[in-house]
Amino acid sequence: MKHTRALLGLAAVIVALLIARAGTAAHLKTAVGEVAAKTETAFDSVTIGQRFHIRYHFTFDPDSLRPLVPKKINAGTCRVMAVTYNEAKKDPKDKQVERIADVTFIPLSIDSSVVPANKFDFLADNGDTIRAWTDEVRVPIKRIAANAKDLDPLKEQWKAPPNYLLWGGIALAVLVAIAALIWWIRKRRRRGEVEKPAIRLPPEVIALAELERIAALNLPARGDYKQHYTLVVDTLRHYIEARYGVESMDRTTYELMDALGRHRVRVDGLEPLLNEADLVKFAKFAPSPDNATAAVSRAREMVIHTTPVVAAPDPLAPSEPSQPSAPVAGAS
């Protein structure tokens, strides 16, 4: 008895599911006699980027069916640009109404485009959905130039004859302007040279001022012996080159002393200071801070001792007696 009741309950559930499925299928029907659909085209071929129209005609009874606007129209290899709907009665005596969907497309393929079949739904009075299908449309694409024969040869553009007189005058004016600019620059330079004579300080003044600057840096206190000796020796070399006219900057210590000997120039203490500086710069010799500081004083003494002494006139010295003037001819 229990098994019979279970089987009857299971059968009731299956029957209910079948009825529900049948009821659901009844809500969506394909239009056979309710809606007459027709697809209309008015083109043979189009070019890339050219718009074309497809008109979908639907004839139905407005008393029993109400058209639904589709959410999206399948454009295939094209793009939908615009959609318009129009309705009109085909026959005043007939209840049938013709609804026209005018869809504007633009092709995207370069060979051939296809607009697939689209669905348009209608709502019946009993709640059923009646679906009408349109035809598939193939859109031939026409190329602008299938071969070179389709193109007409381009005419050569007109070229204006060159105006040699105009261009010659422009070139002459440019040359005159450049020559005037060069003349003005040279004249200003010459005037500057005359108005601003170069002021040259004696070599001993330059050397002593540079040595004072080096002493103020106090490089030995920071352990920078190489930079300290380099500055001191370079100052001496500049001074010797300016004082005696002997090239000193690009010579080694031996070459410089040999050149000074050939010029019969003797600077006491120069060679030991140069040798000491070479040890510090190239042999990484570390002198004592006192010796490094004394290098400035030694260089200063060399500059002072080699500076020519110009004797100043003594105001207390007796002046030489003036020579008697010659007698004037014809004097009495």
Image: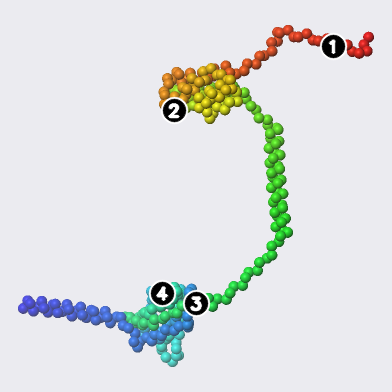
At x 36% / y 82%, what residue is drawn? 133
First in sequence, mark 2 or 1: give its number: 2
Foreground of the two, 87 or 312: 312
Q: Which amino acid does label 4 sit on?
A: Thr
Q: Residue at x 65, y 16 (%)?
A: 310
Residue 217: give x, y in percent of width and height. 49, 24
Q: How crowded is mark 1: few (under 14 residues within 10 Å), some or many (20 or more)?
A: few
Instruction: Please provide percent x and percent y for residue 232.
Output: 51, 24
- In the rendered image, the quadrant that contains the C terminus is top right
Q: Is residue 297 visible?
A: no
Instruction: Find residue 164 and report its image quarter.
Output: bottom right
Task: Indicate the position of residue 266 as horizontal and vertical percent values.
Answer: 56, 19
**Residue under pointer 2:** 282
**Given the current orientation, which residue lies at the most extreme front position?**
262
Tell me which amino acid carries mark 3. Answer: Ala
Residue 15 left/right relative to 315: left
Counting every numbered tag in the picture gives 4
Mark 4 or 3: in front is 3
Residue bearing mark 1: 325
The type of residue carrying mark 2 is Phe
Asked whether the residues under the numbered discs 2 and 1 touch, taking CB atoms below 8 Å apart as contact, a structural biologist would say: no
Residue 139 visible somewhere in the drawing: yes
Q: Name the residue under label 3.
A: 146
Give the label, 4 or 2, closer to the camera. 2
Which sits earlier in the primary sequence, circle 4 or circle 2? 4
Q: Nearer the viewer, residue 57 or 67?
A: 57
- Amino acid at circle 1: Ser
- For marks 2 and 3 on the same chain, the one whose residue lies earlier in the sequence: 3
The answer to which image quadrant residue 244 occupies is: top right
Marks 2 and 3 in Cβ contact (< 8 Å): no
Q: How far apart are marks 2 and 3 (CA)?
A: 83 Å
Local packing at callout 4 (Cα closer than 10 Å; few below 14, some 14-19, many 20+) is some
